[in-house]
Amino acid sequence: MDIAAGRYALADVVAHHSHGDPGHLCTACAFSAGCIATGQDEEAMRRVQCVVEHLGPYHVGDAIFRTHEPFRAIYAVRAGMVKTQVVDGDGHEQVLGFYLPGEAVGLNAIHPERYPCDAVALDTVYVCRFSFPTVRELAQQVPDLLMNLLRALSKEIGTSAMLAGDYSADERMAAFLLDLGERLAERRQSATQLHLAMPRSDIANYLRLAPETVSRVLARFREQGLIRVDGREIELTDAPRLRERARNVLQR
């Protein structure tokens, strides 16, 4: 794995983090309150002199961190998609989540102080690495940073509760597609044009469904005019009807 790590003072983060367009990615990042501070917060950033590591590229299957490794940092995805998973003693994998650019990975390691899962690249991935001691110091200077991270953690908990419900395959799939679209929209991307970097088997695992069930549901949605499918590209052609399908899930 070719990992090129660069350390940048906080004042330099925005240009590197967003490839010259800080409004496009960094404002949607869980750490944006720290990286794009203004006014008094900007002065606080100069005092703290936070250091961020830029890591990548990770390629398909490369681990960003592994289960039981000591917790030392939280990661923000800069490009690509990351999945988290746990693997039991018999080698059975359980997919826990998928992370888009701007989303924080590793928040669930704060309490155990060890990563409770693997974080694995689904395609070519770049990340920002924030050491946790730095995050704690930064949160004292910029309260909005703490709130952003708490919101991200709260959403993860809510998603886990949602998947634990007794919902049909159609309800789960509709909710999954809509949630992915909404998260893309938060990053100023299309909410209806989805690229599924993960294989169907990962989607099935995440939704607690059989892979053939996922294929049947997607085929049914296509026949009903709810989506268009071209390989891993999915277009949501009737989001209101999809939302009606997912009503019971999304109201949680």
Image (spheres, rainbow, N blue to C red):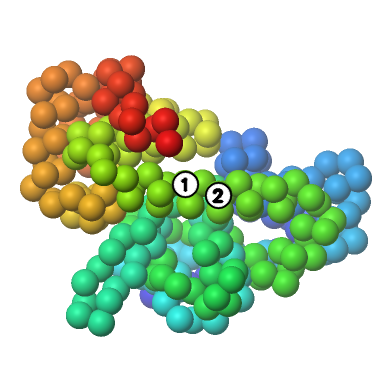
Residue 20 visible in the picture: no
Is there CB contact under 8 Å for labels 2 and 1?
yes
Q: Secondary structure at mark 1?
A: helix
**Residue nearer the viewer, 20 or 176:** 176
Counting from the top left corner in percent of width and height, residue 59 is at 35, 64
Q: Which mark is residue 135?
A: none
Asked whether, in this view, residue 112 is left or right of residue 169, the answer is right
Q: Residue at x 67, y 69 (%)?
A: 132
Q: Residue at x 21, y 77 (%)?
A: 91
Q: Residue at x 58, y 77 (%)?
A: 113
Asked whether, in this view, residue 76 is left or right of residue 214, the answer is right
Asked whether, in this view, residue 223 is left or right of residue 136, the answer is left
Give the residue at the far front of this rendering: 166
Type of residue at label 2? Ser
Q: Which mark is residue 158?
A: 1
Mark 2 lies on residue:
154
Q: Which quadrant is the N terminus positioned in?
A: bottom left
Q: Eyeballing the image, is 102 above or below 63?
A: above
Answer few, some or many: residues within 10 Å of disc 2's Cα (few below 14, many 20 plus, some between 14 and 19): few
